[in-house]
């Protein structure tokens, strides 16, 4: 695998006796969407500010796009687009005028800047609203405009701090789809900071769980689930038309299967806890034994369960 585009080593930040970030190590690779998860006050924004060279670390280092953020913040800012949780635009100016102003700040000539601004408005779905003053924009529209703003300079990395805050559910879905499309189509690396676990789960390739300034774990959801829940990693429920007798004669036979650890019976529904995915084999077994299978479902351990488990472990 190529060298990480964001590389963090032993990063820490203290404000007096308060430790905002402690011993953070993290790699984010080219083209992936990485979710930095944690409650408000966990140290996510502080970490982002150190990535951008906007605040000095107390220890450790951050390298972004090949540059040390602390000693070379200007090259980092040329490569990285940052959208904070609170956006600011000139309300008396139109959306297009705001973007053209940003383009000029990034070194574009007038004609090229307008062309680039129009292209970005098309990408984020605001081309029909380009002449509306931003003071009349909704929160969701401003978030899209903010995304257009960070894309103006053709960044290699975009960092989004709580990007779905205050957007209605329909707007969130559209916004997250837009981020995913940008990453896949243009190869942009995305670091997304949020405390909305469900939103992050929808689009992130990997996540990092951040609590009290520490990165407790990082990886994809499957990896984190298996690490945390171990033998409970796969849970399959099978509902049949017949009521299951107690004791169930077939239970002893099934418990001989490799990877099957536990069977729970509730009327006509049987739940199997396994170390591997045995769903297909279980369905075949029930059909062979002349049971009428009404439904089959698998329990997925999402980010809510994973995060809660790590949070509980941290409190011990």
Image (cartoon, grey):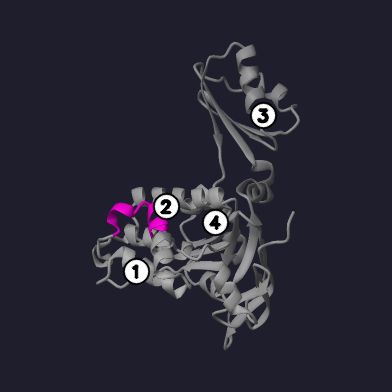
Q: Are marks 1 and 3 in contact (CB under 8 Å)?
A: no
SS type, badge 3: loop
Of mark 1 and mark 3, the one earlier in the sequence is 1
What is the quadrant of the N terminus in the image?
bottom right
Q: Residues within 10 Å of mark 1 (few under 14, many from 20)?
A: many
x then y, percent, for residue 297: 53, 30
Kindly report which numbered mark, 2 or 4, lies closer to the viewer in this rendering: 2
Residue at point 34% right, 62% down? 142
In the rendering, which numbered label is found on residue 39? none
C-alpha separation, residue under disc 1 versus residue under disc 2: 16 Å
Kindly report which numbered mark, 1 or 3, lies closer to the viewer in this rendering: 1
Of mark 3 and mark 4, the one earlier in the sequence is 3
The residue at which mark 1 appears reads as 98
Of mark 1 and mark 2, the one earlier in the sequence is 1
C-alpha separation, residue under disc 2 versus residue under disc 4: 37 Å
The residue at which mark 4 appears reads as 308
The residue at which mark 3 appears reads as 278
């Amino acid at each position: 695998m190529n060298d990480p585009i964001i590389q963090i080593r032993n990063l820490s930040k203290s404000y007096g006796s308060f430790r905002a970030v402690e011993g953070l190590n993290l790699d984010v690779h080219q083209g992936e969407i990485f979710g930095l998860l944690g409650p408000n006050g966990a140290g996510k924004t502080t970490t982002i500010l150190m990535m951008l060279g906007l605040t000095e670390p107390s220890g450790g280092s951050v390298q972004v796009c090949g540059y040390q953020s602390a000693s070379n913040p200007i090259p980092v800012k040329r490569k990285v687009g940052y959208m904070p949780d609170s956006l600011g635009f000139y309300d008396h100016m139109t959306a297009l005028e705001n973007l053209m102003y940003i383009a000029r700040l990034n070194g574009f000539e007038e004609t090229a800047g307008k062309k680039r601004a129009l292209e970005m408005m098309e990408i984020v779905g605001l081309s029909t609203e380009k002449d509306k003053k931003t003071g009349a924009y909704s929160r969701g529209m401003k978030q899209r405009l903010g995304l257009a703003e960070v894309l103006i300079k053709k960044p290699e990395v975009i960092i989004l701090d709580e990007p779905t805050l205050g957007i209605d559910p329909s707007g969130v879905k559209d916004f997250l789809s837009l981020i995913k499309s940008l990453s896949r189509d243009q190869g942009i690396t995305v670091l997304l900071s949020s405390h909305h676990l469900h939103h992050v789960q929808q689009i992130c390739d990997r996540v990092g769980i951040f609590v009290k300034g520490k990165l407790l774990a990082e990886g994809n959801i499957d990896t984190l689930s298996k690490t945390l829940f171990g033998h409970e990693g796969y849970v399959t429920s099978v509902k049949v038309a017949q009521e299951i007798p107690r004791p169930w004669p077939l239970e002893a036979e099934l418990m001989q299967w490799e990877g099957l650890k536990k069977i729970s019976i509730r009327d006509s529904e049987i739940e199997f806890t396994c170390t591997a995915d045995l769903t297909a084999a279980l369905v075949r077994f029930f059909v062979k034994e002349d049971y009428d299978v009404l439904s089959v479902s698998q329990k997925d351990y999402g980010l809510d369960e994973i995060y809660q488990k790590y949070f509980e472990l941290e409190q011990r």
